[in-house]
Image (cartoon, grey):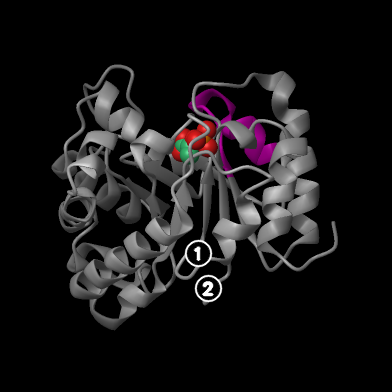
């Protein structure tokens, strides 16, 4: 892997203060793997508490609004995420694209707002099973990259600084226990890299491309060793330290 691997847990709409003990355990392990960048994205309600509870790992939001403030009931802006202690935000997760009808343009606006507020970003892309079966996976993902990523002028130095990551998450692999074939992951990551280089020039090489979709202790080592895989975005297996730590360990060379 050319970059420091990035392992990010997405707790989705799970977690209460009782789960902070898991976060602390994950954080202690993250400290033993300085060659791995680890972050957890809990629900909004836990970001502040998690920030206070951990020291070695990053804390992320799972979404933000594209506007800095205003009449958007129930939404949270990127600046608010920063204020409560987040350093990164996931945007364009397929569950948000589907549940909230988020278009590529909306995802791009959120990504640009997040960078402007000083957050790192993880922009999610991925095809549905129907799109893969129709032979359209690469075209769909290329379109998402072209239209969901921040433009080069807005991204500025953030790309070179490693603050922009992409998560390739085939929709059919999320939460299903079905993992993409390593050869398909390698091919898609190469296609994504090509688009990133077209978008950002040679600094596009600095964007880490994570794989997401049913990553667990049993498959992490093979996926993380695959060509072009710069880390993992992990849902279900990030909810406990017991399930998440082997994934961090598979990415690093520290002692367990
Ligand atoms: C995700 O939600 O981003 C994800 C990859 O979920 P899971 O690991 O549960 O498939």
User: Mark 1 vs mark 2: which is more N-terminal?
Assistant: 2
Q: Which residue is mark 1?
A: 230
Q: Position of residue 214 (x, y in %)?
A: 53, 38
Q: Which residues are magenta?
A: 40-52
Q: Residue at x 32, y 24 (%)?
A: 75
Q: Mark 1 and 2 residues: CB-CB less than 8 Å, in contact? A: yes
Q: Residue at x 53, y 33 (%)?
A: 177
Question: Majority secondary structure of the magenta segment?
Answer: helix
Residue 71 can be seen in this image: yes
Q: Quadrant of the C terminus?
A: bottom right
Disc 1, SS: loop
Using the image, tell me which numbered label, if any, was put on residue 86: none
Q: Which residue is mark 2?
A: 3
The answer to whether residue 224 is left or right of residue 253 is left
Disc 2, SS: loop
Q: Residue at x 48, y 63 (%)?
A: 229
Image height of 120 relative to 129, above or below: below
The answer to whether residue 40 is left or right of residue 191 is right
């Amino acid at each position: 892997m050319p970059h420091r691997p990035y392992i990010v847990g997405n707790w989705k709409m799970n977690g209460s203060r009782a789960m902070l003990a898991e976060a602390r355990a994950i954080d202690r392990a993250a400290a033993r793997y300085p060659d791995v960048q680890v972050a957890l994205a809990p629900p909004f309600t836990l970001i502040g508490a998690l920030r206070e509870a951990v020291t070695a790992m990053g804390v992320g939001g799972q979404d933000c609004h594209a506007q800095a403030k205003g009449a958007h009931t129930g939404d949270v802006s990127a600046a608010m995420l920063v204020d409560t202690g987040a350093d990164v935000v996931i945007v364009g997760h397929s569950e948000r694209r589907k549940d909230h009808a988020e278009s590529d343009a909306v995802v791009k606006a959120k990504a640009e707002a997040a960078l402007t507020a000083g957050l790192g970003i993880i922009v999610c892309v991925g095809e549905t099973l129907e799109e893969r079966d129709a032979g359209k996976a690469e075209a769909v993902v290329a379109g998402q990259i072209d239209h969901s990523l921040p433009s080069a002028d807005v991204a500025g130095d953030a790309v070179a600084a490693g603050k922009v990551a992409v998560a390739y998450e085939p929709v059919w692999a999320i939460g299903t226990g079905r993992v993409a074939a390593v050869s398909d992951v390698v091919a898609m990551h190469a296609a994504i890299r090509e688009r990133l280089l077209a978008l950002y020039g040679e600094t596009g090489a600095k964007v880490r491309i994570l794989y997401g979709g049913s990553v667990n202790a049993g498959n992490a080592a093979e996926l993380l060793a695959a060509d072009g895989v710069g880390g993992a975005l992990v849902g279900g297996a990030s909810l406990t330290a017991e399930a998440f730590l082997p994934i961090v360990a598979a990415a690093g060379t520290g002692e367990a």
